[in-house]
Amino acid sequence: EAKLLLTRRATIRLLSEYGQVLWNKVSVEPYPKKKTEKYGPSVLACCLGPGNPATTFVMLDSSGELLDVLYAGSIAL
């Protein structure tokens, strides 16, 4: 019973810490743009899941049009 309780607490703690690390990585302001870039304001969206591929990133312009797609098998922190 104690082993199960400790395992649950450790799992919750690790998931919380991993979530905080991921949040810290994705909640930063964008890099300053160079004047030579051809796109205006844009949004990067990420979809995580068990699909094939498991992780997909898309770049959208300010009107919602698709600019770029990146398929990633997995991400590591």
Image (cartoon, grey):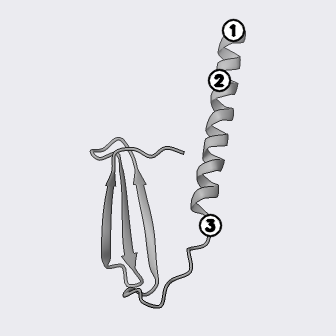
Residue at disc 2, secondary structure: helix
Q: CA distance from mark 1 to mark 2?
A: 11 Å
Q: In which quadrant of the rendered view does residue 42 lie? A: bottom left
Q: CA distance from mark 3 to mark 2?
A: 31 Å
Q: Residue at x 38, y 71 (%)?
A: 59
Tell me the tag on residue 34: none
Q: In which quadrant of the rendered view does residue 14 lie? A: top right
Above or below for 41 versus 30: below
Above or below for 77 versus 66: above
Query: Is the C-beta separation of discs 3 and 2 under 8 Å?
Result: no
Disc 2 crowd rating (10 Å Cα; few below 14, some 14-19, many 20+) is: few
Residue at disc 1, secondary structure: loop
Q: Residue furthest top?
A: 1
Tell me the tag on residue 1: 1
Amino acid type at image mark 3: Val
Tell me the tag on residue 28: 3
Q: CA distance from mark 1 to mark 3?
A: 42 Å
Specify which label sits upstream in the sequence, 1 or 2.
1
Give the residue pinned by disc 2: 8
Q: Is residue 1 left or right of residue 65?
A: right
Amino acid type at image mark 1: Glu
Residue 61 is situated, as x and y percent measured from the top left of the image, at: 38, 80
Q: Residue furthest bottom?
A: 35
